[in-house]
Each structure stands twice: as C-alpha cells, then as structure tokens.
Image (cartoon, grey):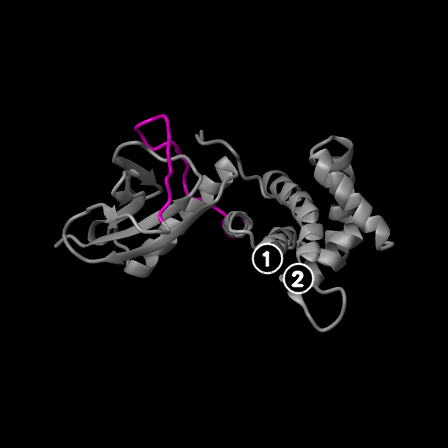
Amino acid sequence: MAEWCRWGVAGEIAWPRKQAIVEFGNWELLAFPSTRDHEPSLHIELTRNKVSAVGARTIFNRLLSICSWCDDAPAALLDGDCGGPDAYPLARTRRSGHLTSIIDAWPYHRAPLAHPDQRLAVALYREAVWLEYISSIPYAALGYFKILEIRQGGAGRKTWLDHHLQQAMELGEIDDFYLEKFVSAAGENGLSPARYLYENCRLAVAHAAKAPVVDPDDAQSVRDLSASTQVLRTLARKYICVDLDVLEDHWQG
C-alpha cells in the first residue's frame, strides 16, 4: 500500500506554478505549488522509493540545500507528516512561504552531490542563509565560517583566508559598503582582516568565556558583525565553488 510523506517549504527559492514531478537521483518526488490556501510542499511515496520517514526528510533537505545553493536564497522545511495513500496539498499556516516561479515545471535539474564534503558544505550554507534570513546574524556568520573548516584547519585555513580574502577584495567580489565597514572594524581592533574574521566573528560567536563575545541583544554588536557576515558569505561560496567543485547552475550536464 502506498504511504506518502509530505512537508511544507518556506523561503525565497524558485518554485513551480503547478504540481511538478521532481527527479532527484534514484528518487521521484512531487512539488506542490503555493496557492492562496495551500503552502508549497514536497512529497515522496515511501514504499515505491524504498525510504523511511526519517530518510524522506533527509532527501527533502538535501534537495532544498541544492536549490538554496543554486539561487543563493533561503529555503527550509516547515511542518509535515507521513501516512495515507494519497499526496495532497498542505493547508497554509502563518509560517508558510510564498515561493513563486515564472515556469510550470520543476526549475532545478541536479543530482544529489556525490561527496560527503560537498553535501555538508551546501547543507551548512543553506542553514546559514536561512539564519541570516530570519535575522540570526551571529549564527549565520558562524555557519559560513564552519564551511571554511571543511578539509582544512589551523595553518591551512589561515593561509586560505589570507589569500582568498585579499583576492576577493582586489577583484571587487565583496560589496564596497560591507567591505569598508569590515576593514574599518578589523583596523580598529588592531587585527588583520583574516584574523578579525577568526577571533571577532568565529570565536566571538561560538564561545562566551572571554572577550570578544557577540551579545545578540546588543544592537551595535550585531550591526558590526553584519558586514563581516557578508564577507564570510562571499568566501563560503568561493570555497564551495573552487575548493569543493560544486556547480552553481540549475542544470547539470
């Protein structure tokens, strides 16, 4: 007997205007559109696809991480459930998204990422973009930095940061508004830009035992961190693209 799993989706990624079939690796999913009464949602039939309810959520998350990566936009699963022989739309809630598209079909044609490091990187990226979207700037900054720690740490991470941060600044890859504020903040603290990202962003968010510590209630503290967060977002995308070889295209092959 068929058993469907269905979960709502929120964010700002592209989404089909009509119900669409989604081919994702060996799995076949359905994407339901956003309407006045129903939220955008993903569906999978568990028996035919040979997955558990927990496995279904992982598949949904993996798919959304690729969508978020391609569009550089927030995406997250909302509430859902499993059971029943039919796929049906989910009623809209206060948390529902209004995902839209100019096309009827599923707009992404990507296979699951092959390497665990690639999957982890885009998962962390989606999480960080979502946190930034809901105004959790400190943990967005930490999420972007964690991506830079995949496959490298210590001296290797410092060398990568020094080189690619300087390159991004020289090539104009960072918005001038954020870059000016970031460089100014680093200078005021007597730190190189790369060292500032590590001490005043990564450590200041992850730990609270000693200064510097980011206080999420302190508006100035969070405002100062916002510029660094945009710098880290740029570096995280560069690392995923160049070092982990993840394509940004909607279509693969």
Count of numbered tags = 2
- Image height check: is 236 above or below 5? above
Dot 1 falls on a residue whose secondary structure is: helix
The amino acid type of the residue labelled 2 equals Val
Sequence-wise, the earlier of marks 1 and 2 is 1
Task: Tell me what residue is drawn at x 49 percent, y 36 percent.
Answer: 70
Residue nearer the viewer, 132 or 117: 132
Q: Residues within 10 Å of mark 1 (few under 14, many from 20)?
A: many
The amino acid type of the residue labelled 1 equals Tyr
Q: Which residue is mark 1?
A: 139
Let me know if residue 113 appears in the view.
Answer: no
Magenta stretch: dominant secondary structure: loop
Task: Tell me what residue is drawn at x 57 percent, y 39 percent.
Answer: 245
> 206 left or right of 60?
right
Q: Which x, y percent locates residue 235?
A: 66, 43
Q: Name the image quarter holding residue 246.
A: top right
Mark 1 touches mark 2? (CB < 8 Å): yes
Q: Name the image quarter holding residue 166.
A: top right
Q: Which residue is mark 2?
A: 205
- Image height check: is 212 above or below 46? below
Q: Which x, y percent locates residue 115?
A: 50, 48
Q: Which x, y percent locates residue 230?
A: 65, 44
User: Disc number at residue 2?
Assistant: none
Let me know if residue 171 appears in the view.
Answer: yes
Q: Residue furthest right?
A: 190
Give the magenta-colored segment's residue range: 96-120
Query: Label 1 vs label 2: CA separation?
Result: 7 Å
Dot 2 falls on a residue whose secondary structure is: helix
